[in-house]
Image: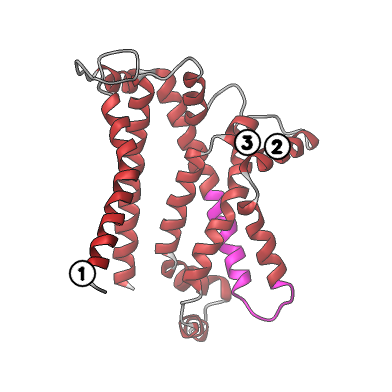
Amino acid sequence: MTRNTRLVMSIIYWAFVLYVFMPLVLMVTMGFKDSKFIGFPIKSWTLDWYLGVVQNSEVLSAFGYSIWIGVTSTAISLFVGIWISVLLNGKGFYGKTLIYGLTLLPALIPGIISAISFRIYAQLWGVSPGTGAIIWCHAVHNVPFVVLIVSARLSTLPKSYLDAARDLGADPLIAFIRVALPYLKPALIGGGVFCLLISFDDFVRSFFLGGYQPTLPVLIFAKLRSGMSPEINAIATVVLVLTGALGIWAERSMRRLNKGN
């Protein structure tokens, strides 16, 4: 690679970084504006919008509600996704390709189509819009991601580990719990955090299947209908910081566990 080529590649890279991070910088900055309207220049600065976020019971309730839905749907997705991954990595049965394709299908369907179909299906079964319907829809949407991540990790597990456990008297279930499950920890952490963030950020499915209590994305959308304000920037910045911290923790935990294995 010549020097000019490296220079061009560096310019393209930093231009891309600027393109990605500049909107985030502007969003964070606008949260400090001492005004009810978004725009430049910023004549005075304040922390009132950020302090208002942690004191706003409506925002805190929506945040806690979103976390509850995310954690519950993620737990269901992990449980279902693990056993589907074990099935797909097994041998001696037909239809593996069909099962794999059907498993990945929910992740390929556009969000608006998925939300409408789940709303119709929920009405067919008499499921009222609300927490249960949202968790159900989020879990189904997240299972394919768990299967992809866990299957990739499970395929690298040496078969001799499970064979050794069975030679020592462990049945298949105990061998999986004592040997395979600890080996899957990095994938479970990564898949769990990924599903949690997807569920937390999901607007379309939460909007179509939600009840009277809004999730945080739905609440932000409702506030946007009355106009953009620094309050929305402050809420988004707090969420950005928390999700960023969660992502960094997950990445470091996965790296540490991978080194241990």
Mark 2–mark 1 Cα distance, whole angstroms, equals 53 Å
- Using a 10 Å C-alpha cutoff, classify the residue at mark 3 as few (fewer than 14 neighbours), some (14 to 19) or many (20 or more): some
Q: How crowded is mark 1: few (under 14 residues within 10 Å), some or many (20 or more)?
A: few
Residue at numbered disc 1: 3
Quadrant of the image occupied by residue 232 = top left
Quick one: 59 or 167, which is closer to the camera?
Answer: 59
Q: Residue 132 carries which label?
A: 3
The amino acid type of the residue labelled 3 equals: Gly
Give the amino acid at mark 1: Arg
Q: In the image, what residue occupies the spot 42% across and 23% down?
A: 59
Dot 3: element: helix
Pick whichever, 60 or 11, lies toward us.
11
* Residues under numbered marks 2 and 1 in contact, where contact means CB atoms less than 8 Å apart: no
The kind of residue tagged 2 is Ile
Q: Which of marks 2 and 1 is in front?
A: 1
CA separation in Å, label 3 and label 1: 58 Å
Q: Can you tell which quarter of the image residue 26 is in?
A: top left
- Taking depth in this image into account, of 99 and 181 the one nearest to the observer is 99
The picture places residue 169, in percent across and down from the top left corner, at 52, 82
**Is label 2 in a helix, a strand or a loop?**
helix
Q: Give the range drawn in magenta.
A: 75-96
Mark 1: secondary structure = helix
Q: Which of marks 2 and 1 is nearer the N terminus?
A: 1
Residue on which the image places disc 2? 116
| Residue 90 included in the magenta stretch of the image | yes
Write down the quadrant of residue 254 in the picture: bottom left
Horizontal side, residue 83 vs residue 56: left or right: right
* Left or right position of 32 against 130: left
